[in-house]
Image: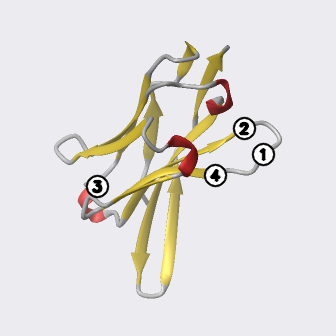
Amino acid sequence: QVQLVESGGGLVQAGGSLRLSCAASESIFSINVMGWYRQAPGKQRELVAAITSGSSTNYADSVKGRFTISGDSAKNTVYLQMSSLKPEDTAVYYCNARRLWMLDEYDYWGQGTQVTVSS
């Protein structure tokens, strides 16, 4: 069981920046994929960015060039640096850890952190 604790959300004006942190209870090298998802009111949860244990990254088209995902193995922490924020980035952001074992996927979630971007 991987435990995840997010921090860093808040209120920011459009054009501003925030950095989200996700602290994992074990080495992020032992986790196949770490990701950030978000869910806005009335919308489905969507993938924002992901990073593999081999440091490959993937981004949603809507955040490419504005958001950067990175990991610090010494701190067992994954970050999401968000810049040039837009009101449409407003959502609850969730950290996800995905572990692959044989043919199964095991997903673990943090409690979420609110990001609000004012226009």
Three-letter amino acid code of the residue under disc 2:
Ala
Viewer-nearest of discs 2 and 3: 2
Q: Secondary structure at mark 3?
A: helix
Q: CA distance from mark 1 to mark 3?
A: 29 Å
Quarter of the image containing the N terminus?
A: bottom left
Q: Secondary structure at mark 2?
A: loop
Q: Which mark is residue 46?
A: 4
Q: Are marks 1 and 4 in contact (CB under 8 Å)?
A: yes
Quarter of the image containing the C terminus?
A: top right
Q: Secondary structure at mark 4?
A: strand
Is residue 45 visible to the viewer in this orientation of the structure?
Answer: yes
Residue plotted at (66% across, 24% down):
87
In depth, the one of 105 and 59 nearer the eye is: 59
Q: Which mark is residue 40?
A: 2
Q: Which mark is residue 43?
A: 1
Check disc 2: other Cα within 10 Å, few if <14, some if 14-19, many if 20+: some
Q: Are marks 2 and 3 in contact (CB under 8 Å)?
A: no
Q: CA distance from mark 2 to mark 3?
A: 27 Å
Three-letter amino acid code of the residue under disc 1:
Lys
| N-term mark: 2 or 3 | 3
In the rendered image, the vertical position of residue 95 relative to residue 14, given as above or below: below
Q: CA distance from mark 3 to mark 4?
A: 22 Å
Three-letter amino acid code of the residue under disc 4:
Glu
Q: Are marks 2 and 1 in contact (CB under 8 Å)?
A: yes
Q: Position of residue 79 (x, y in %)?
A: 36, 38
Q: CA distance from mark 1 to mark 4?
A: 9 Å
